[in-house]
Each structure stands twice: as structure tokens, then as C-alpha cells.
Amino acid sequence: MPRTDRRRTPPAENYSPRGTAGGRPPAAAADPIFLPPLKPSRRLFAVAAALVLLWLGVLLTLYVTTVFPHRHDRPARGDATMPPATLPAGSVAR
């Protein structure tokens, strides 16, 4: 494989490792404008609370109709559908 000659070129005169052009500090940002705080709204709070309760009701309904019934369909002990328990060779049942 041929060797390539990679020579370092000197950095540009306005380059600064801090990212500012020409070593000058960045222009001062405009002071932020503070607006008055929002007023609490009882109606908006009630609507948001109702939506959260409605969403929790939907999630609970989905859980009860899909997961809950299958969770309790496990076979009872001693049922013929369960595989018999096996012990490793040489061990004694207690």
C-alpha cells in the first residue's frame, strides 16, 4: 500500500478552539423578556383531571377485558394437563 504524505496545514488566522471567530467574544445576547405568570384556571384544571380519569378508566377496562381473565386460567394442582415433576438421577424425594 503506498504511503501518502499528510502534512499539517496551519490553522486559519481567525480560528479559535473555543468556537469564536477571531478570538472575539460572541455578541451579547439580548436580555430575555419576562411575561407575567399565567393565572390558574379552575375550568382548565377540571377538564384536564376529567381527561386523566377517563384515560385511566380506559386503561383499566382494557386490562380487565384482556389480561385479567387469562391470568386466572392456570390449571389447578393435580390437573392431568400439568406435566409430572421429575427429579435428577440419584436424588431422593423428601
Image: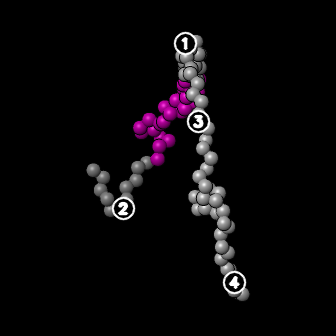
Q: Amino acid at mark 4?
A: Asp
- Tell me, yes or no, if residue 73 can be seen here: no
The residue closer to the viewer here, 35 or 82, is 35
Camera-near label (3 vs 4) is 3
- SS category of the residue bearing label 1: helix
Q: Residues within 10 Å of mark 4 (few under 14, many from 20)?
A: few
Q: Which residue is mark 1?
A: 42
Q: Amino acid at mark 3?
A: Asp
C-beta proximity under 8 Å, tags 1 and 3: no
C-beta proximity under 8 Å, tags 1 and 4: no
Q: Quadrant of residue 12?
A: bottom right
State the CA–CA distance, disc 3 to disc 4.
51 Å
Q: Which residue is mark 4?
A: 5
Give yes or no for residue 90 being in the magenta stretch.
no
Choose the circle earlier in sequence order: 4 or 2: 4
Left or right: where does residue 20 sit relative to residue 77? Answer: right
Camera-near label (1 vs 3) is 3
C-beta proximity under 8 Å, tags 2 and 3: no
Instruction: Name the spot of residue 7 as percent of width and height, x first.
Output: 67, 80
Instruction: Name the spot of residue 18 as percent of width and height, x first.
Output: 58, 58
Instruction: Name the spot of residue 69 as percent of width and height, x first.
Output: 53, 29
Choose the circle earlier in sequence order: 2 or 3: 3
Q: Which residue is mark 2?
A: 89
Camera-near label (2 vs 3) is 3
Instruction: Name the spot of residue 13 as percent of width and height, x first.
Output: 66, 66
Residue at 69% in and 86% down? 3
- SS category of the residue bearing label 2: loop
Q: Which residues are magenta?
A: 56-83
Q: Residues within 10 Å of mark 2 (few under 14, many from 20)?
A: few
